[in-house]
Image (tube, rainbow, N blue to C red):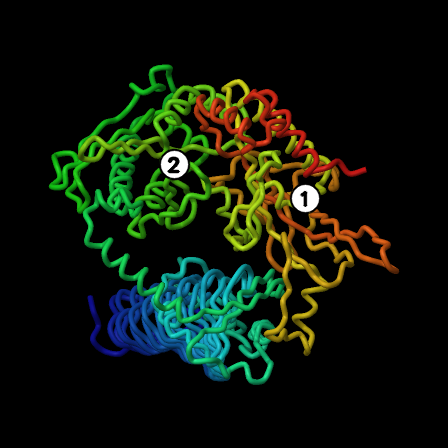
Amino acid sequence: MVFRMSQEIKLHGDVYFGNVKGKLPHGMGSYTWSDGTVYDGNWEDGKMCGRGRISWSSGTSYEGDFSGGYLHGFGTLTTPDGSVYKGSWRLNIQNGVGRKEYSNSDVYDGCWKDGVHEGSGKYAWGNGNTYIGNWKSGKMFGRGVMKWINGDLFDGSWLNGYRHGSGVYRFSDGSYYFGTWTKGLKDGQGTFYPAGSKCSSFRKKAHSQRFRDPERNVTRTYSEKITFSGFFRDSGRITSRRIPPDDDYALGDSTREFSTSERTEMFSRISDEGESEVDDDSTVAWEREYMQGVLMKERVKNHSGALSSKSKQSKRITNESKQKSCVDIFEGHKSYCLMLNLQLGIRYTVGKITPVPMREVRSSDFGERARIRMYFPRKGSQFTPPHYSVDFHWKDYCPMVFRNLREMFKLDAAEYMMSICGDDGLRELSSPGKSGSLFYLSHDDRFVIKTLRRSELKVLLKMLPSYYDHVKKYDNTLITKFFGLHEITLRGGKKVRFIVMGNMFKTELRIHRRYDLKGSYQGRFTCKDHIDEGTTLKDLDLAYEFHMDKTLREALFEQIQLDCSFLESQQIIDYSLLLGLHFRAPEHLKALLEAPDAEHGSSSSLEFDDGPKSGELSIPPTGLLLVTHEPSSVNTAPGPHIRGNTLRAFSVGDKEVDLLLPGTGRLRVQLGVNMPAQANRKVSQEVSGSTEVELFEVYDVVLYLGIIDILQDYNMRKKIEQACKSVRYDPISISVADPKFYSKRFINFLHKVFPVDP
């Protein structure tokens, strides 16, 4: 029964005055708690519901929609410090679109989720700095544009509030820097265009380019979840859990947050007078390479008018290629339709095999006859969807074997399909070797897809049972991880075969140098004019020795020996150790970031042949630390190239270890992944005339290693023998294509690269 008259009810010190239903507030009414909190508004069955206003004793107030006793709908929250949020709410938490004005004059307009910024939004700091772009968990994440009050602007990718990945930085004087960042610091190669340069085409590129990575922290994570819930206890008393008076609603002083970043950008600024006066017929640029914010290499690059004509020619060729058919495009290695076919086939077969109950593989699951075949007509069929590519036949080899391998490598089927078959598609790469194979990279860089020759397919199918047993037995194997083997037959009978592998260089740290090491010195070098950050260097290009923790080194060589023995048993030769290096910036160079005179003029030319180099040859302080493993402190989820146990280290008492990188993070150490070392490089310095003193440059590095190119067919040995006779390969190194000799030479070479500490 509802009483329409106003009544006063007292409950354990609380007072309610208004309409009731039985003994419960219902309709319009005012409730005052004993601590001074007051609510005026609509009630339904004893709970705040509809429009109303609540004021807490702390001075915080809310006016807007309620539902079931929660702030739910649209409303305005005002706190004692002057902060005001006006927008959507869900169960006491900001959720949806809203605007918040902070007490320090900062303003955020955009999307919220669970009380923090999530989605698209604009943040304007009280000092005039502005960010427009994507957010995640209260931090800048994804594509976004940051503009500072001094006129500087960054348009690029962000991760956890840091500039991280590809981007363009426009300085207030009109100069530009195109490059990559890692957690707020320039890291890797880029190009600097001084003010006045003719780089309008590059400006257009900056605004149209699809940035893929993410950068610099300007906000700290904050939580504004309001924790008052139900208003009735079992005793019948209405309760109110108020917003804690010490909750933090501000983002902090943005001037302090940006100080380090601005010093970094000033460090890269060209300060010589007259640099903006550039010839209108040319573009002057500087190719630069940074290591965690430290400028390590700089080279002047001039672009003449010939570049423009070359670009026009390239554009014309691109336009012509768009008019070709899919088959013609494939013949020209512009294989867009081939990529679509690959995605369709993988989506179909992975989706078909995933629901099948897991079981141990059988002998019948191996070989060419163990396969799934399907026809994909363009118009679609009972089993296949319509598509925009050409008609093709699809074949999936040994589906149960590769399904079990993916499970063994702890790859989720849905994530695997989304990575390769998602809307972002695949990226075609130029072949880094002489095989002529096509290479694709998944949009998230997790997987590499390579075309195979028929002979390589036969080798893999023959060795697959032994490969399966080997990777099952040895979790820490360094051998390439295979996830799928497929074949596409196009009109006319042309067959294209693919192998899907894990990308070893999908890492949390930037890879500054890559090496393909075979242990041979004949012709194993790279022309210096062709070297950039993505170049894979060779044996003669490696000028370092790497010194590691004793136990880590023993574990590494034990596994290398096991893997080489397996490859011997399969008669495999000519494989390589793929080595990736992440350099930690020496502390004595990092100090330059803090120095007031740390700017480099355009005339500097800090060249180095093979890795970071500085004018000072002193050994910097240690930048890497091994600490006892704490699973709660690191990500233990396996990746496409990560599998196996956390390694033990001699230096911490033979315990499992994590790698601590001061100022960066904490990583789990696994075999071939996140392995710390010191890189020593010999240099000579002339003293008193002709006398030379042998000195060393020492760098802290993180190593990533894997054994690749294991699918050479048996006929490759004959080709190598013939090449030896023509001195294309080192006859002593290759011998007569003996797998045992090859593995022995390979391991001996690696012992020189990773020597035992005295």
Is residue 407 in sight in this rendering?
Answer: yes
- Whole-angstrom CA distance, mark 2 to mark 1, is 35 Å
In front of the other: 677 or 715: 715
Q: Examine the rendering and report whether any part of residue 57 can be seen.
A: no
Pointer 1: residues within 10 angstroms few (<14), some, or many (20+)? some
Q: Secondary structure at mark 1?
A: strand
Which quadrant of the structure image shows residue 281?
bottom left
Q: In the rendered view, tell whether residue 89 sits above or below residue 101.
A: above
- Residue at the outermost top position: 363
Point out the image quarter for the C terminus.
top right
Q: Residue furthest right?
A: 688
Q: Amino acid at mark 2?
A: Val
Q: Residue at x 45, y 62 (%)?
A: 166
Give the foreground label among 2 and 1. 2
| Residue 508, position as x, y percentages in the image | 53, 51
At a point 47% along the width and 72% down the height, the residue shown is: 169
| First along the sequence among labels 2 and 1 | 2
* Residue 528, image x, y percentages: 57, 53
Q: Is residue 152 above or below residue 660?
A: below
Give how far across and how far down residue 701 sits, in percent: 65, 49
182 or 735, nearer to the observer:
735
Q: Which residue is mark 2?
A: 500
Quadrant (top left, top right, bottom left, bottom right) of the N terminus:
bottom left
> What secondary structure is marked by label 2?
strand
Q: Please indicate whether residue 481 sits to the left or right of residue 384 in the image.
A: right
Q: Are marks 2 and 1 in contact (CB under 8 Å)?
A: no
Q: Which of the pair 713/256 is nearer the observer?
A: 713
- Amino acid type, callout 1: Thr
| Residue positioned 26% across, 72% down in the render | 50
Q: Which residue position holds label 1?
A: 628
Q: Residue at x 38, y 38 (%)?
A: 437
Residue 741 versus residue 303: which sits nearer the camera? 303
